[in-house]
Image (cartoon, rainbow, N blue to C red):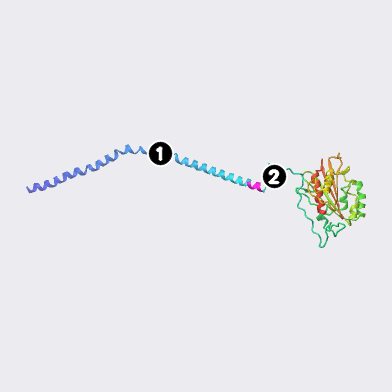
Amino acid sequence: MSSEQTTTGPETEAVPTAPEAAPAPTAAPTAATTPAPQTAPEPRPAAAPETAPAPPKDRRALRAALRWGAAVAVFAAVGAGVAYGLTVAERTDLPGLATEGDGRWAYPKLSQPALPAGAPLAHGPDNKDGTHYAPLTALLLPAPAGAKADSAVKADKDGLVPVDSFLEEYAPEAREKLKNSLTWDGLRQIAGRGWTTPDGTRTHVYLLRFHASGFADAFKGCDSNAQFAGVSALDLDDVWSKAKNTQMNSTALDFPGAANFDGTDLSVYQEMKPVSGEEQTKVGCLRTGDVLGVVLQTRKGEVAPVPFHQTVILQSQLLG
């Protein structure tokens, strides 16, 4: 009896535990594999179409912002440049604000040359004869801006011109008589300068210094009877004559520039019309003290009156 109970006891205890442990691993795989095909594919295809287009929209907006920013920067720079250009430009350079030029040349700023210590002014109260003590070349009018030197005026490195070179401005038949006059009438030296402006005008300016004012007045090489090379005949410049007469009665002038005629005898001539040949010549004669000034301008067609009168006036002021 005791031996049967011992063998059946362990059997009855092992039988219920074996089937309970076996089903646990078989139930888990079936529960895990069944729902997987139903839920995994559905949410992912729906999310992909919503999020994919977003990055291109952001890049396009960024590029548009950069383009507009660059455009604003360019317009700002251009506007600043235009504003600066308007502030520094000359009025005559601005479209719509330009004023018509009167034809004057742009000469350098002029000033009277320094005198030797103790020397009086040419028209000072203690200089009755009007003697010029400044170097003759320092009294010579400089060329205007844009002009080129004219080698026809044969001045040396110091600006002085030999007598024979100066006489080349006259007709061959008049040179010998004029040379004798210069030799016997107290000529000391001649200074000269020549230039050609872009419009084709050739300008020759000479200053002749004599020993005294009486010799300068006696020289007949600068008046209406002077025989300049290539010039048929000279007549008074009507425009200048009217302007000079106006200045005698008032302070106004009919042409640009203010001339001080005190102490200077100015005579201005022009080649009579019809002009012989293709060129016209105008001549300005300035007598002041011991110096005689000769201004010659020649141009194809006709010499413009404004720059010619301007040149005569400025040379007169330097001699004054």
What is the x, y in percent for residue 297? 83, 46
What is the x, y in percent for residue 299? 81, 43
Q: Residue at x 88, y 51 (%)?
A: 164
Q: 51 and 283: which one is in front?
A: 283
Q: 83 and 156: which one is in front?
A: 83
Quick one: label 2, few (<14), some, or many (20+) residues within 10 Å?
few
In the displayed image of the protein, which residue is found farthest to the bottom?
Answer: 118
| Circle 2 SS class | helix
Residue 98 figure quarter: top right
Look at the image and tell me whether residue 309 can be seen. yes
Q: Which residue is mark 1?
A: 48
In the displayed image of the protein, which residue is found farthest to the front?
Answer: 249
In the displayed image of the protein, which residue is found farthest to the left?
Answer: 1
Q: Which residues are magenta?
A: 83-87
Of circles 1 and 2, which is in front? 2
Q: Amino acid at mark 2?
A: Asp
Quick one: label 1, few (<14), some, or many (20+) residues within 10 Å?
few
Q: Given contact means CB atoms under 8 Å apart, are the residues at marks 1 and 2 in contact?
A: no
Q: Which residue is mark 2?
A: 93
What distance separates the C-alpha of mark 1 from that of mark 2? Answer: 65 Å
Q: Seen in the image, is 75 located left or right of residue 11?
A: right
Q: Amino acid at mark 1?
A: Ala
Q: Seen in the image, is 29 located left or right of residue 181?
A: left
Residue 99 figure quarter: top right
